[in-house]
Amino acid sequence: MIVTADAAGIRRAADMLRAGSVVAFPTETVYGLGADAFSEQAIAEVYRLKNRPSWNPLIVHVANVAAARALAAEWPEAANELAAAFWPGPLTLVVRRAEHLTGVGADTGTIAVRVPAHEVALRLLEAVELPLAAPSANRSESISPTTAEHVLRSLPDVPLVLDGGAASWGIESTVLDVTGAVPRLLRPGALGLREIREVTGAIALPDDVADGSARPSPGMSRRHYAPRAKVVLTDEVDASALDGSVGVLTYETEDVPGAEILSADPREYAADLYAALHRLDDAGVATILVKSPPDTEEWLAIRDRLTRAAA
Ligand code: TXA
Ligand code: MG
């Protein structure tokens, strides 16, 4: 059921979460499937609904830096500086997990945390007074939801979806491991590497982060973020080969009738990408030809998602 994220909706969602139920809610990146991070039963329901493998841990959302520190065994200086610069916002920090926590899914000894920059998410966190584990609210391996409707389409059994409109970033948070001497990128995402480097200096990149073959974070399976249709990345879309079973996703104004044409600006492209893939799936095409975006760092997160969608 989709509920408007007004005061009554948020109160209802908070009550359900405190009672051990799951609730989907908007963040600035994508919608999350939220659960009380301390409730084993609620966490188990997240894994069940998503069909998520048990080895893939969940990220935890908190209302502020103090609440994040309370979940950590160690809060390194880099975490302090990054949190000051980018929270609330689309950066997830992996730190050593506090001993007393029995874990949010997988037992990695670490915990991934972020303060989301979405008014509804923050009001919900304040109302519920609990850290909320929340992976993207989609079936494992499929496209992340950027609207409340996407959530229900992927997870029809979610009892409540708070509707906060379309997610403004439209792509998941950047995940950065700050447990070592040099911060290490685990997943490229909404927050760009240039911005992060301005705070931390050098960061370690997995060699093959852009080609999709690495699994730097447990959740980075080769295939992920995928629509039903087969995705094929190509440098040149050959419009003459098109018929009703083939859809096209490109980012320039090209004369390809029926194509999804996204912005040539990476931020705007990311904001529309998942919705465009949903639309192409709705159109019932068997194959989606995707024009490969430029091979530059600004497009890193988008290239990562498209490569995994095509795997
Ligand atoms: O933008 C986002 O991050 C969204 C919104 C809802 O906040 N959430 C999201 O969650 O994308 P999920 O579960 O789809 O992706 C979280 C990523 C996964 O790749 C997971 O493996 C990784 O973070 N992760 C979670 N806990 C981790 C940990 N302790 N160590 C390393 N990676 C971790
Ligand atoms: Mg996900």
Image (cartoon, rainbow, N blue to C red):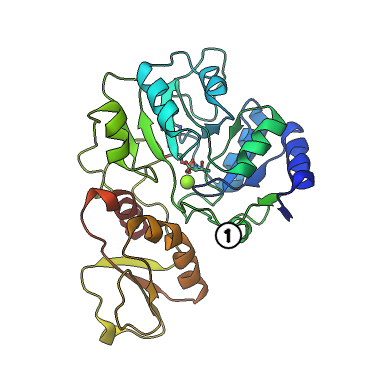
Residue nearest the viewer, comparing 100 with 199: 199
User: Splitting the image into 4 quarters, where does residue 149 fall?
Assistant: bottom right
Answer yes or no: disc 1 within 8 Å of ligand 2: no
Residue 152 percent location from the top left of the image: 63, 58
Which residue corresponds to the image point at 42% horizontal and 68% vertical from the top-left?
229
Q: Residues within 10 Å of mark 1 (few under 14, many from 20)?
A: many
User: Splitting the image into 4 quarters, where does residue 195 fall?
Assistant: top left
Dot 1 corresponds to which residue? 150
Residue 311 percent location from the top left of the image: 32, 56
Q: Is residue 189 visible?
A: yes
Which residue corresponds to the image point at 45% horizontal and 40% vertical from the top-left?
90
Residue nearest the viewer, comparing 15 with 284: 15
Q: Does dot 1 land on a helix, a strand or a loop?
A: helix
Which residue corresponds to the image point at 38% horizontal and 61% vertical from the top-left?
269
Which residue corresponds to the image point at 61% horizontal and 41% vertical from the top-left?
121
The vertical placement of 78 against 208, above or below, is above
The vertical placement of 288 against 4, above or below, is below
**148 relative position to 183: left or right:** right
The vertical placement of 275 against 25, above or below, is below
Residue 80 percent location from the top left of the image: 41, 21
Residue nearest the viewer, comparing 308 with 80: 80
Q: Is residue 158 visible?
A: no
**157 relative position to 137: left or right:** right
> How many marks can you see?
1
The vertical placement of 128 against 118, above or below, is above
Q: Quadrant of the N terminus?
A: bottom right
**53 relative position to 119: left or right:** left
Q: Amino acid at mark 1?
A: His
Residue 133 percent location from the top left of the image: 58, 34
**30 relative position to 311: left or right:** right
